[in-house]
Image (spheres, grey):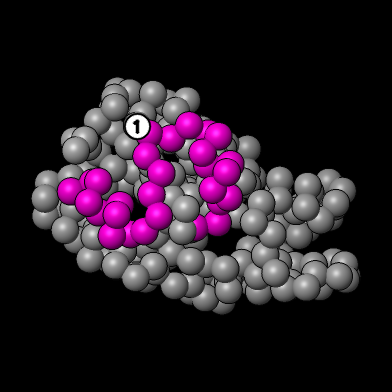
Amino acid sequence: MPYFSHIIFDLDGTLTDNTRGIGSSIKYALDKIQLDGFNGVVPDEFIGPPLQQGFKKLFGLNERNTELAVEYFREYYSVHGLLENDPYPGIFEMLEELHFAGKHLYIATSKLEKFALQISDHFGFNKYIVQLKGADYKGEHATKATIVSHLLESRQLQSSKKIVMIGDTLFDIEGGIENGLSTIALTYGFGKKEDLEKAGPDYLIDSVEELYEVLV
């Protein structure tokens, strides 16, 4: 089995299933800009990239409406949506076990950092997480590769295969590879299995239990 000393987790689709909160926040945002037609189903491609990219690409918004939609999304999400969220079964126990096994645990997410910190605090992840890095408010430095790079720099960590990036989308895998890390792709989240396979992760994992077996 591999030995990983430092473990970086994505948040959405990796530690928690936030489908309910994201769907409610998208609906609120589109209603506010008076755009009809959202059926309540969160597009798979919406989760992972920066919000600006998701609204522009998937809902065809212009620059101004994209800016407004992001603001309205965050308005709802900051009060209600972030807690319309469900940790995957076994996640908390896994983090606890890894922490007591001496692993250094981190979160790197494209979610706005202040929201990610609230979620981590609410569910008790912060007891085991050394540091969390998220997106800046404007989404200018929100690619996963950039966020992981900033995290490594802030901890004075060099690229190493003993550091692993774990996530459910190709953005997570690409972000790990670009920073010279090992990568684990999770099929139980929001990414498509075929996309994850094409990204070339070191491991493709189907469950929290299987993930724990690789990390312990």
Q: Residue at x 21, y 35 (%)?
A: 2
Where in the figure is residue 89, as x and y percent of width and height? 34, 70
Determine which quarter of the picture holds residue 74. bottom right
Compare residues 8 and 1 and report the one nearer the observer.
Answer: 1
- Determine if residue 32 is in view: no
- Locate the N terminus and report the quarter of the image it occupies: top left
* 20 with respect to 172 (left or right): right
Where in the figure is residue 14, as x and y percent of width and height? 43, 56
* 187 with respect to 132 (left or right): right
Compare residues 69 and 24 and report the one nearer the observer.
Answer: 24
Secondary structure at badge 1 equals strand
Q: Residue at x 25, y 54 (%)?
A: 212
Where 210 falls versus 30 (above or below)? above
**Label 1 sits on what residue type?**
Ser
Q: Which residues are magenta?
A: 189-216
Question: Label 1: which residue?
Answer: 182
